[in-house]
Structures are given as structure tokens and as C-alpha cells.
Amino acid sequence: MNLTATLPAVVPARPAQGYWRSVLGRLVRDKVAMFCAFMLLAIVLIAIFAPWLAPYDPAAASMLKRLQPIGTEGHLLGTDELGRDLMTRLMYGGRLSLVMGIGPVVLAFVIGSLLGVTAGFAGGMVNTSIMRTVDVFYAFPSVLLAIAISGALGAGLVNALVSLTIVFIPPIVRVAESVTTQVRSLDYVEAARASGAGNAVIIRLHVLPNVVGPIFVYATGLVSVSLILASGLSFLGLGVKPPLAEWGLMLNTLRAAIYSNPWVAALPGLMIFTVSICCNLLSDGLRQAMDVTR
Amino acid sequence: MSAAPLVEVRDLAVSFSRGGQSIAAVNGVSFDLAAGEVMGVLGESGSGKSVTLRALLRLLPEHRTRIGGSVRVDGHDVLALRGRALDDYRGAVTSMIFQEPMLSFDPVFTIGRQIAESVKRHTGVDDKAARARALEMLDRVRIPSPARRLEAYPHEMSGGMRQRAMIALALACRPKLLLADEPTTALDATVQIQILLLLRELQQEFGMAVIFVTHDVGVAAEVSDRLGVMYAGRLVEIGPAVDVIESPSHPYTRGLLSSIVRGDMRGTRIEAIPGAPPDLAALPAGCSFAPRCAHVRPECLASVPPMRAATEDHAARCILVGPLAPA
Amino acid sequence: MTATPILEARQLVKRFPVKGGLLGKARSWVHAVDDVSFAIAAGESLGVVGESGCGKSTTARLLVHLLEPDAGTILLDGRPIGVTNGVPLTQARRQIQMVFQDSFASLNPRLTVEASVAFGPRVHGVSQREATERARSLLARVGLEPDRFAGRYPHELSGGQRQRVNIARALALQPRVVILDEAVSALDKSVEAQVLNLLLDLKAEFGLTYVFISHDLNVVRYMSDRVMVMYLGKIAELGPVASIYDDARHPYTRALLSAMPSMNPRRRTTQAPLAGDPPNPIDPPPGCRFKARCRHAEEVCGQGDIQLYAAGEAHRVACLMDQPRAGHSHSAKAVVP
């Protein structure tokens, strides 16, 4: 009998699986990340289905029921300064707030990655001109920049979206550029070049798949910042206008009630906080899950 | 050996937890080392040779490492040392040199200052005496114009000079045991031989014991009195360097030596060992070399073979070798 | 040599600027490869040895056109590459392939092993099906059973297995010349032996020509027909493997050979052949590059460039001691071939 033939294979015979599936597999085992993902999904779904789920009309005011406390019969989370049901408004407010949180990040992710990968891959003068332009924006604190651009463009949902997108492009360009520069000098890119591959193929097959991950992780971390900045713009009257429901705006209008009914006034802030922290923790989990051990 | 050995390692076992798995890096390593003796430890990547060395200086990350067994160095129970006692042990009794000297030095301080600080810390002498010792050490490791080099920063030195400076730092407090973790692997050939000769010379001059870990048989042959061979976290063979290299007993040692190209072998095939080392997260129950061994027998798969003596001071962990070695 | 060499380098020069000063202007230059000429016959293995900074890796990158030379030409079958009326670059790239040292960094972590090997043929217009088929048969040829390994990602393989994939990838374009830049240096000895055996088998099977770059003199001796010794961007000595190992002429080659560990604890090395580290090739002084570390150096060594001189049939040495009437006190003894 040939004993060596009956021994287990030296290399563990694992079934081959795709990279993103293995990332998902590791992410699913991360309890904190999974809890955050579940919370975010619930909040998004509630926001989407607000018209069907909400008990009242978000604009239905009642002078008789102003600033009811939490737990009031018929108004579980109380009412605001115009007597509108707060639970309804939080549900509807999520729609605009989430759009303001995610929208600018998605736009900046696309534009920033494009600029950053171009700068990183091309190098030389192209790199210098893109990166120095970006540095100009980088010199301003993000809050000031958002306020300045919004102020210049005027209040409104679309203008707030545009200003936040501009705020998030520079940091994403920076991350994209540095990751691309790293990948560009790796041997497998050299090997592809030595095989006669052109720049387009190298970028599509060898650079993009290896840089998108890190940029994406960074961008998910920006969602919370965007949400807070958007709320801040609304709070300052530069974002959404009343009577529309938006968490930042609600925080602004309820601040008068901070002494009389602090718990109700804090609720929109609590929502912003919850979404932000869930985004950050999920982004951390994703970062860990994407780290392939050598 | 009549006197108590300087180093006594018994059943040393080290495992790491990673991603829910337990990686058994070292699995029951035992050996003695007399004062002033040089032991080479030969092994390939993942054989546990570096981990064993780090365990002797307690350099492994505490929170995710489990260490078992016992390690005694010059009367210290190394695995039980805590806080201040551990700091006193490191550098004064045992010190270490690495493959990458930049890891030993802080880039923002001069070489001279770092050696002097270490001397002050362990011997309590004043600044002047410490600097004098630093200068003397740089001279001992044959760094040209040592007085000027005292003021140099690590990045200002070439690879070979940095390696010399690291040896000066490690030996500044006259340790009884020097641990060397592949200190010449990253060096060019003509520099490597200089460092090996220097280490041999300083070892004899200071009379210290050395454990020299390497993957290179040639380097091990240059420095070792005794030679241990590690495979999958176990010491599979140990004996006088001449005996291990000239008449290897363990099939792995034999395979390793025959797979090394030397002299004029052109036109002949190299006798390579088939296969690859086992996964340390799922070690086989028996001899870990059995899956690659040409002489494997059913009993090899049942349990880990004990150390058996080939000659009086030469033993191997293989059932095909002579009588059982005394523990 | 009578037949046209398959690959020839003529007076290659490559310099890298050392940035310094406020505006980042180059103030000094690293002479990585300085006036290097050699030819490789079809089916031959040329070994290249030398220490860090000797220019062996830069030479490799010049040969596969990952770097453009500042001066000099590279000829494939006697025709210059990448110029009008010469060999087009894409065709040269197909014929000259390279295996890198770092097996992990040279594989795209997001591509399966099979996709990595099939990539080259795809770029050169081979159909997806045929490229995949070729990749699978090459994987089988380098000892990686395609059914088990084709769908794996680089991090799921060991170093030796990854280097086998890199070899398969280099062979996928059916090249005639393969440049192996420290291709086995990072591997454990027992794995290195397997890969060396494989490389020799592949060479015989596909009729390949190798440029085998390594710092391990034993391995170079085993793999090469001729050996080129480089020092600070220049060729120190070039000749048949037996001449280099048994009758080395250049003091540097002799130092390299005697710096090899003895492998015998009974006969240990007692004296280091050279003192100090190899210097940086930044703005080197004129004359012999080795003179600062050479025990035979004389004033004449610092005057003017030292040309390769025939020290025997096919054996060339860049040392004045081997040139008659060169003015060095040892010159007189040099034999005229």
C-alpha cells in the first residue's frame, strides 16, 4: 500500500470563492457590523415606506396638541412646536436626511475616484495639477466650505447636495490617488505591462479592482459626516426649508422647546447620532473584512 | 554536561489565535544550552524558529499568544517575569539582534545616545561612563572612526554598518545569552561573511552563549557548535553541527541538505523534498513530516515520534533512528 | 559567436536622478547601468550575479522594456527593438518575458490564478476559450492541478505555488527568452529545489533561453552556461561558468566566491575577503568602480574607463591586471591569449 497517497492533501482543499464573497463571509461573522447594518436597513426601509407606515400626515398641525411629551396617547413620541406628530416627522425626515447623507458621498465617490485614479496612474504633470487644485479646497475646514458654497448658491435641497459633494471630493481624491500610486508600482502591474497590455486594460483589470475597495471603505465613513453637515446646513437655514421634514431642520425648530420638553427636542439628534455611528462601525467592519491575510 | 546549563527550555509551546483559528507555531521544544556555547537553529519559514527565539525574550504579543512549558535562563524563570524584572532581564541577561537593524533603533536619536541609554539603564553608571562604553563598543564591532559614528543617526549608515551598530547595542551590557534572528539574511554576500566572523570573534571574546536562527545551512555551518533543525514547530534533530551536517539522521534534515545546490551539480537533478510543510492550524496527529516522507510507516501517523539518540549527543525525532534519547 | 544572438544589449546606460534641493532638481545621478554590452545565444542560460546596487535588476527591467535606456540598444535576433524597421515593441514583449522575485506582489490579488495566466494571451488577441485552455494546461505543466488550483486567488496559495503561477504566466505568451529576476530567492530551500528542477525541465521542453539573475552563487552556477558578474553598474567579468568559478580573474569575482559560506563546520571561513559595504553607485569616480575595495588597486586604476579584455576564449575581464602593458604592476604577468 502506498501510504503517502492515502494521506490528506498537504494544501487544504478549500473550494475557491470570489473575493467579494469571502469579504461578505467575514462581514457576516462580525456581530457589531451586522447589528449596524440591520439598524441602517431598518431606518432606510422605514424612511422609504413612511407614507404607508406613518400614523399621521407630516404637515397636519394642531395648535391644541403642541409639544406633547413622549408617551402621549395617540402620539407615541410626542408632538413638535406646531403640534405635528413627531414619529411621523422622524419617519418622513429620514427620507431627506438619508438622501443628504448618502447622495453627496456617492457623487463625490464617483468624481473623486475618477480624478484620484487618473492622478495616481498618470503621475507627473497631470498628478501635480489635479492634486494641487484639490489642495486648495483642502485648505478650508469642511464645515466652513460647505456653509460658504451653500451660502453662495443659495438655500435649497439641490444646492446643499452640490455644496456637500464639492466638500467631499478632495479627501476622496487624496485617498484614491495614494492607493493608486501604491498599486501602480506593484509587480503585477509591471508584469501586465511586460505582457504588452495597454493603459486602459491595466486600469480596468489591475488597478480599479484593487483600489475601489479602500476608497469605498473610506467613503462609507464619510456618510456620517455628510449627514451631520447636511443637518447643520438645514439648521442654519441653508438646506431644506420648512415645513419639509428633515432631521437637522427639526432639531433647529425644536430647540425652543429644549427647556420645556428636552426629550422630544433631542429625538432628531438621536436619529442623526444613530445613523452616523452605525455607518462608522459598519465601515470599520468592512475595512477589517476586506483585509486579506497574506 | 556537569554544571547547570545556562538555558533550559522544556516543552515550550506557543500558539496564536487568528481569525478564530489556533495556529500552533511551536509544539513542545526542549533543549539545553551551556554558557559560552553557540547553537544554530535551522528551519524554513513557518518552522517556529523565530517564534521560539522571541519566546526566550518574551517578545510575543501577550494578548493573542498562549505560551506553555518552561524557559529558564541563568536562573530566571523567563515565562514568569513581570514588569521591572522583565525589563532587567532584557538587554542585561539576554539580548537580541534582528534581520532588520532599523527595528532595533529609534530613528530620531543618534546611535551613540541609544547605546549609552541602554548602558545607563542596566548598569546605573553616569553619562560619561555610558558614552565611553558606547564608544568602546563601536570600536569593538570595527566601525571605522567610531567617535564620529556616535553622533550618526541610524539612517545615515549603510546596511553593514547598521548591523554592526545593532550588535554593539545588543552587547553593550555584556549579556550572557545573545539571540540572533537571521541577522545576516538581508546583507550582501561580502558583508554577510564579515558580520559572521565578527559575531564569532565577539562570542569568543565575551564568552557568551548564542542561539543563531537561520534558514541558510552555510551560515549555520559557519557559526554553530551545535545545530538544531526545526520543522512545523518541533525540534526534529539536534546534535553537534559537524554530525548533523555530515550524517543527518532525520529524513527532513537529509532532504533539506540534499535539496541545497552546492559545488558543481550542473546536469544532475536536485533531490527536492516533494510537497509542502503542513498547515499549522491543522497539524497531523503523528509526525508532521510524514506526509512528505519517503520512509513513512503506519506508526508514524499514529503519534508524534519521541526524540531518539543516534549517538551520545545527537538525537532525532524519527522512529527509524536508534534508541530513545534520555529526556 | 557565429550565429546571431537571440538577445543582445549594446552599450546600455540607465541613470536615475537623485532628487535634492528646493525645486527637486536632480543634483546627482545613480549610475544604475553604465555602458553594459552582452549577447545571449538561443538556448543558452546567462547567469547574472552581483550585490545590491550592481544594476542586475535594472538590466532585467531594461531587457523587458519596463524601463527605457538612456542610451544604447537592445536587439532581438539582431534587430533593434521599438524603432522603425526594427522589431515592434508588442512583438518583443511577447518574446521576452519576466518572472519577478516577490511572488505575492507580482500577482493581482483580485484575479484567479487562471485569469492571471490567461491575461497575457488575451491581451495579444487570443480568444477567451483558447486562453483559458492554454492557462489550464500550463498550470498543469508547472505542477498545479488545474481542477484544484485554477479558481484560487493568490492569497490562498503558498509562496512556492505562487511562483509556479508566475512561471506559467510568463510562459503563457510562448516567449523565447525568460528573464528570472531573483525568481527563487524568496523561496525556502526545499521549495527552491523543486522550482529549479521545474525551470530546467521547462527550458528543455520549450527550448527557452534564460537570463538567470540571483545573488546566490551556487544556484547561478547550477543554472547557467555563462555568468556575468556585475559591480556598481558595470560588467566586472563575463565568461563560461567553469572559467568564472574555477578561474576567476577579477578581484571582485574572487572576493564574491570566497565570501560564500563553507557549508563545512570543520573548515570554516577564517578571513573576510573584503571590508566594508558595497558603495552607492551615485556619481562614481572615473576608472575602475571596484578600486576603493580592491587590495591590488594602484594609481593607474583610477585613470580612464576600463574596458572588458579577453582573458581566455569567451572569457572577458574588466581589470587592468589582466591586460598586458596596461601600466598596472601586475599587468606584465598577464598572459596574452
Image: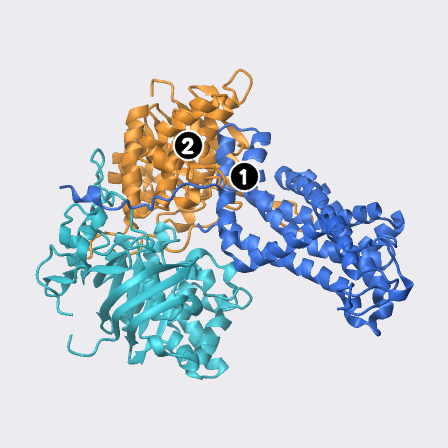
Residue C288 vertical position relative to residue B191 in the rendered view, above or below: above
For this rendering, which residue is in front, C211 or A75? A75
In the rendering, at what x and y percent does residue B296 appear? 16, 49
Rendered image quadrant of residue A177:
top right
Q: Residue at x 33, y 63 (%)?
A: B198
In the rendering, at what x and y percent does residue B125 appear? 45, 84
In the rendering, at what x and y percent does residue C15 appear? 54, 39
**In the image, what residue type sits under mark 2?**
Arg
Disc 1 target residue? C15
Alpha carbon distance from label 1 to label 2: 30 Å
For this rendering, which residue is in front, B280 or A64? A64
**In the image, what residue type sits under mark 1?**
Arg
Q: Residue at x 84, y 50 (%)?
A: A149
- Disc 1: CA contacts within 10 A as few (<14), some (14-19) or many (>=20): many
In the rendering, at what x and y percent does residue C77 appear? 42, 19
Disc 2 target residue? C169
Rendered image quadrant of residue B100:
bottom left
| Chain that is coloured orange in the picture | C
